[in-house]
Image (cartoon, rainbow, N blue to C red):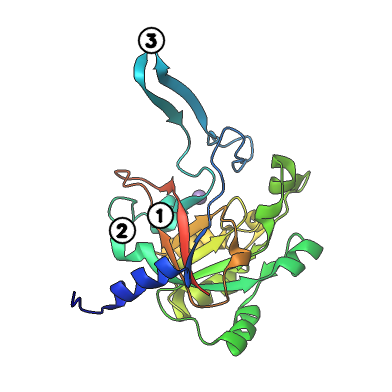
């Protein structure tokens, strides 16, 4: 036994010993999973429906399987650059063409859970990010910027979507902050616990929906409806987020996991 020690053999040992933990950043995906609601003039994205093909019965005596129907952007899901009109001309902008290296990346986690609890429309600014960098170091190119809001702890559709006559109220990013992250920090993308990467009120921002408009226009990615971000350190975790290889897909539900050093 004289196996060469590599970074991956060390990782395997760290995983085996529990010194590196695997944390599930994914919400359960079921018929009750809430999906974003658009104004009435737009087509709506369906949530998940599931129907049984067979379950050890006359339709299939030894096997169980289901048919699922769902929008690409349902539950914990991935946003590809082609999802937004600003990203439609970019190369490698669909779920099947994004280079797979982008599906593994370090995480920078900014905790705004207290702010978002006090003010549901909390908006992260460039200044907030710079203050975070003052404590945790500069965001490295190719990092996920994850916004911890503890929104995933809300139970039930109404509390999660948090809408009133003005529309939804949930935290997100200021356009200037998105520009900074995309162009001055070259992040992989942004990930959030809310139903979409933009703030609930972001339809009224300039530009509207900057975490889509600016991020995808820059070829960046998105992750929505993440969970367990409270189990991640500000830096040091690695996120694995690989969408289904849907041909010409704009996004996909996925299992997001993080490798976290103890
Ligand atoms: Mn989406």
Q: Return the x and y of residue 29 as percentages of the image width and height.
A: 53, 41
Q: Is residue 192 above or below residue 60?
A: below
Image spot of residue 55 (x, y percent): 42, 20
Would you identify the image quadrant in which residue 117 lies?
A: bottom right
Q: Residue lying furthest top in this view?
A: 58
> What residue did someone put label 1 on?
80
- Label located before the other in sequence (1 or 3): 3
Which residue appears at 47% of the width and 22% of the height?
Answer: 51
The response on whether ligand 1 sits within 8 Å of label 3 is no
| Residue depicted at 53% across the width and 87% down the height | 137
Which residue has dot 3 on it?
58
Mark 1 lies on a secondary structure that is loop
Callout 1 touching callout 3 (CB < 8 Å): no
The percent position of residue 15, horizontal first and vertical second, equals: 41, 67
- Left or right: 111 in relation to 4: right
Residue under label 2? 98
């Amino acid at each position: 036994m004289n196996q060469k020690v590599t970074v991956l053999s060390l990782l395997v040992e760290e995983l085996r010993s529990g010194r590196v933990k695997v944390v599930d950043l994914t919400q359960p995906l079921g018929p009750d999973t809430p999906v974003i609601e658009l104004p009435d003039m737009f087509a709506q994205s369906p949530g998940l429906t599931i129907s049984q093909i067979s379950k050890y019965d006359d339709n299939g005596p030894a096997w169980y399987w289901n048919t699922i129907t769902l929008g690409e952007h349902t539950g914990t899901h991935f946003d590809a650059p082609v999802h937004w009109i600003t990203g439609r001309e970019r190369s490698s902008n669909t779920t099947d063409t994004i280079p797979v290296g982008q599906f593994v990346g370090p995480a920078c986690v900014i905790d705004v859970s207290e702010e978002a609890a006090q003010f549901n429309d909390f908006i992260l600014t460039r200044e907030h990010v710079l203050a975070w960098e003052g404590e945790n170091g500069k965001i490295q190119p190719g990092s996920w910027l994850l916004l911890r809001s503890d929104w995933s702890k809300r139970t039930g559709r109404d509390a999660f979507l948090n809408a009133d006559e003005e529309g939804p109220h949930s935290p997100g990013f200021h356009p200037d902050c998105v520009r900074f992250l995309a162009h001055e920090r070259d992040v992989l993308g942004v990930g959030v616990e809310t139903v979409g990467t933009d703030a609930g009120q972001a339809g009224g921002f300039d530009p509207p929906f900057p975490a889509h408009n600016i991020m995808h226009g820059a070829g960046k990615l998105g992750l929505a409806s993440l969970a367990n971000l409270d189990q991640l350190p500000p830096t040091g975790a690695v996120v694995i987020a690989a969408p289904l290889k849907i041909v010409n897909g704009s996004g996909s539900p996925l299992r997001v996991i993080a490798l976290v050093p103890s």
